[in-house]
Image (cartoon, rainbow, N blue to C red):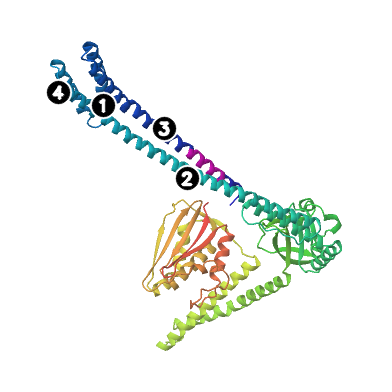
Amino acid sequence: MKLKTKLTLGVGLLFLLIVLMSVIGSVYINKLKSDTEKILTANYNSLEFSKNMLLALDKISTDSAIAVNDFQKNNKLQEKNLTEFGEKEATQSLNLHFNSYLKQPSLEKEKLIREDLAKIMSLNMKGIERKSDIAIITAENATFWIVSLGTVCFLIAFILLFNLPQTIAEPINQLTFGIRQIAAKNYNERVHFKGSEEFNSLADSFNTMAEKLQEYESSSLSKQLMDKKRIETLVNNMHDAVIGLDENHFIYMINDEALKITNLHKEEIIGKTAHEVAINNDLLRELLKNIDHPVKEPIKIVRDNKENYFEQDIIPINIVKTGEKETKYIGKVILLRNITPFKELDFAKTNFIATISHELKTPISAIKMGVQLLGNQKFGALNEQQQELLKSINDDGQRLLNITGELLNLSQVETGNIRLTFEKCSPKEVVQAAVKNVEKLAEQKNVLINTEYLAGDHDFVTADFDKTVWVMNNFLTNAVKHSFQDENIDIKVEKVDSMIQFSITDTGSGIDEKYHRQIFDRYFQVPGEHQNGTGLGLAISKNFIEKQNGEIGVKSTPNQGSTFYFRLPVV
């Protein structure tokens, strides 16, 4: 708890108790005053009126007119001052006896009048005693509460008196001792306060200062220069290009590999901003253009009449200063990783795949043609076993043909030699062409393909018709393969914002969400699936669609089927 809060609570509580004590004292004093006034205005006046009536009664025999007048006057005042129980009845009895006495005076009637006055005086005397007891109780209560609150106030003041000075003085003494130790160059000294947050914050600041002083004291210029030289040598011997920028994009470090590929000289750029140097350097300008969002594609740089490929990586540099807790950004490092050997191997692999696929395609087509001729039975009738064998050869040949076709497409994708012929295409014609290609495959499993067109008849897309049909055909083929017997496949064509979405939904086993990102990677197949495919179809489809400025994706849940979709821009 903060010291300010403690003081506020302690003094505030003391203030409230004093105010409360003052209020209680005022309330009880007013109550005592009220009780006293009641005695004076009620009972004492009744006693006075009764005494005056007795004196008037004594004078009636000598001065009857004046005495009767005094008696009646005090009697009327008494009738207006009836405050005790039974006093009203006694006053009424007095009036009856006095009126009877005026008509026919007698000692007996005078005695009755005196008894009535005595009763009235007795009732008021008892009232005085009762109200006096109430006033005494009120005084005792007032004394109790005032003494109690006064005791509490005393205790709080006593606690504040003995604890507060120590609470403030002890941390100050510790801090003073710590400052003296630091002044004596004893930088190992630390202070630790317990209690208020203000002193804890003060201790943290003091300890941070001590840590920094200790760090500076233990370091030396020669050691720092040696460490700097060691790091520079390490960076210069890296095969990757390294360019260091501070938080304001000033170049403070560049290794020899980076100087070679940028054709820059170290003394010309150190201390200058990267943007200033990039004005006359195309490569650095390209790197800065993508500094916030590094490109995934390798950067091609021609050096020594040879194409070199580099992967760009931007590494932000964040540090925690000595004694501090918050991370501070101090710059970034541009790293160009040389992947030329891997790229050359990749080109060799791609060329090999393209060559083998092209060479295999001709004999496989010849085999299929021979199988087709045998199937037509132009060279003689075939028995049932021969026909089954021929069908198996035909299926395997078609599978090999499909694989070589996918490998050829993959080689085009990898080499960037995809030839796209953009034209105005009707979504309905794309779907119809793809459905026609898989009709026989769907009939084999008795799968019904339903098509729903929600887009307008005048909505067209700009696309390569053949490549788009190929993607649609790939989706439909996969849907048929993964659908159960006698199930349905739904095709939906709808307009989503400024794009036409083609979606194919099957009722198969579905795909776990953790595989959704990998499903479009090359050669990837969902674990547990026993398919004869290459794992290239979806990767090629993704490339075809994205090259047409489209989007591709999947929505699937295990045991609830899958929906593959792609979107193309509306004309």
Q: Which of pointers 3 and 4 lies earlier in the amino acid sequence?
A: 3
Rounded to the nearest angstrom, the CA distance separating label 2 from label 3 is 20 Å
Depth check, front residue: 314 or 188: 188
- Label 1 sits on residue: 82
Rounded to the nearest angstrom, the CA distance separating label 2 from label 4 is 60 Å
**Amino acid type indicated by mark 2:** Ser
**Amino acid type indicated by mark 1:** Leu
**Amino acid type indicated by mark 4:** Glu
From the top left corner, tell me how far across and down residue 13 is, in percent: 52, 44
From the top left corner, tell me how far across and down residue 174 is, in percent: 71, 55
Rounded to the nearest angstrom, the CA distance separating label 2 from label 1 is 40 Å
- Give the label, 2 or 4, closer to the camera: 4
Q: Secondary structure at mark 2?
A: helix
Image disc number at residue 148:
2
How would you rate the neighbour count of disc 2 (Cα within 10 Å): few for under 14, some for 14-19, many for 20 or more? few
**The quarter of the displayed image where residue 322 is located:** bottom right
Q: Which of pointers 2 and 1 lies earlier in the amino acid sequence?
A: 1
| Residue contact at pointers 2 and 3, CB within 8 angstroms | no
**Amino acid type indicated by mark 3:** Asn
- Give the label, 3 or 4, closer to the camera: 4
Rounded to the nearest angstrom, the CA distance separating label 3 from label 4 is 48 Å
The magenta-colored residue range is 9-21
Image disc number at residue 108:
4
- Label 3 sits on residue: 30
Depth check, front residue: 39 or 264: 39
From the top left corner, tell me how far across and down residue 463 is, in percent: 54, 58
Rounded to the nearest angstrom, the CA distance separating label 3 from label 1 is 24 Å
Q: Secondary structure at mark 3?
A: helix
Q: Residue at x 61, y 64 (%)?
A: 418
| Residue contact at pointers 3 and 1, CB within 8 angstroms | no
- Left or right placement of residue 283 versus residue 120 in this view: right
- Left or right placement of residue 355 versus residue 388 in this view: right
